[in-house]
Amino acid sequence: MLDEAIRTLRPTTPQELCALVAEAGAGARHIEVIGGGTKRAIGSMDRVDQVVSTQRLDRIVDYSPDELVLTVQSGVRLADIERLTAARGQMLAFEPPNWTRLLASRGEPTIGGVLGANLSGPRRIRAGAARDHFLGFEAVSGRGEIFKAGGKVVKNVTGYDLMKLMAGSWGTLAILTEVTLKGLPAPRTELTLLLFGLPDVRASEVMTTAMNGPFDVSGAAHLPSYAARARPLKAEMAVTALRLEGFEASVAARAEALFAALRPFGRIDQLDGDHSREFWGQIREVDAFAGDPRPLWRLSLPPSAGWKGPHGLPGDALYDWAGGQAWLLSEEPVAKVRAVTAALGGHALCLRGQPAFGPREGALGALQGRVKAAFDPLGVLNPGRMEDAL
């Protein structure tokens, strides 16, 4: 449970932040690291003595639209970055979600929080994950030291790729103060093909057909009947969706070819423009599951076997990333959910209702411990955040 009485500190410079962390280490104090605070409920936390927010590290350092490169401080709000890039016809291609309705959280997501959790939306199957667009950073380690890694171009790694390490570390290794991201031109047009009433296994075949063909699909999702009936979609049966983006002529040609390839699977409808964007916004934010009180799991699985995870666990599912990301509402025991997912070659994260992260185990767990000790030997930052027990 979060202690709202603990003081929240909001440094305005990396130097101030560095001094706070160094003082905490010297005084054997522990820090909870937050950006906008929208993901605080994910993962348990050991006792902390103070909360440090990066919200006031909110400066746009450099934006070079011609180079498709953006450098900002970590406390810049995600919404501000999206407005800035959209004004120049560009975007963050990994389509990061907010999850504020899903988690019933206050505040606004920051780019540091997005990268710290490595959050990616439906376009991940085409554009890659958040970490793949993370070019460089400045951060304060748990030792109370400022350090930098990466740069402003893709091919800049001569040693360890620390961007990949920081992405998804949930603030347990260092506090990001400045990040550099790669942008991409926003698509000129988009449309979505919809198929209705398919069972999960058949929908998996549809998504596999689309992804394995020359159609350049940028979103592939399946909503079984429970998810499809929920707000805001309120469909009468299961829905399988495939998104195409790009120049108008290219989208039209690919849509015609995809129509032909999918004709054996049944009737196909189409969403254009704003309706397509609205639909994929709902998928990105998992809106169908926002008000359900059951524990909510995110299962990361091999796409071709994605449907098998929810089928081995009673509950209700929604599939994204062509089946590679399965959202599951289930009251099954934690150990069973993790065991079924692991047996399929995947891993599970619980966003609400159960411990978020599994315990450190085996060689990977030992490696995680050594990395944590290298960056934060005194355990100052987000103590226990990624060390849940069953």
Image (spheres, helix red, strand yellow):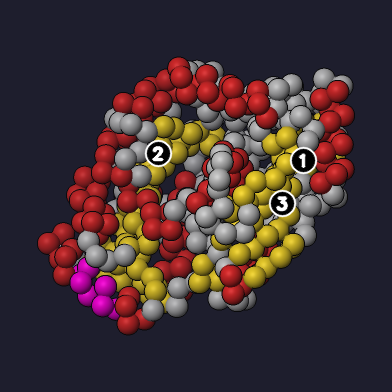
In this orientation, does residue 72 appear? yes
Q: Is residue 18 above or below residue 257?
A: above
The residue singled out by tag 1 in the image is 146
Return the residue nearer the eye: 222 or 8.
8
Residue visible at 66% across and 26% down?
Answer: 374
| Residue 142, horizontal then vertical, whole percent | 74, 31
- Horizontal side, residue 29 vs residue 69: left or right: right
- Horizontal side, residue 36 vs residue 347: left or right: right
The residue singled out by tag 2 in the image is 300
| Residue extent of the magenta highlight | 252-259
Q: Is residue 307 above or below residue 276?
A: above
Dot 1, how many residues are within 10 Å of its Cα: few (below 14), some (14-19), or many (20+)?
A: some
Q: Secondary structure at mark 1?
A: strand
Residue visible at 24% across and 52% down?
Answer: 208
Residue visible at 38% across and 54% down?
Answer: 125
The residue singled out by tag 3 in the image is 178
Q: Is residue 258 above or below residue 56?
A: below
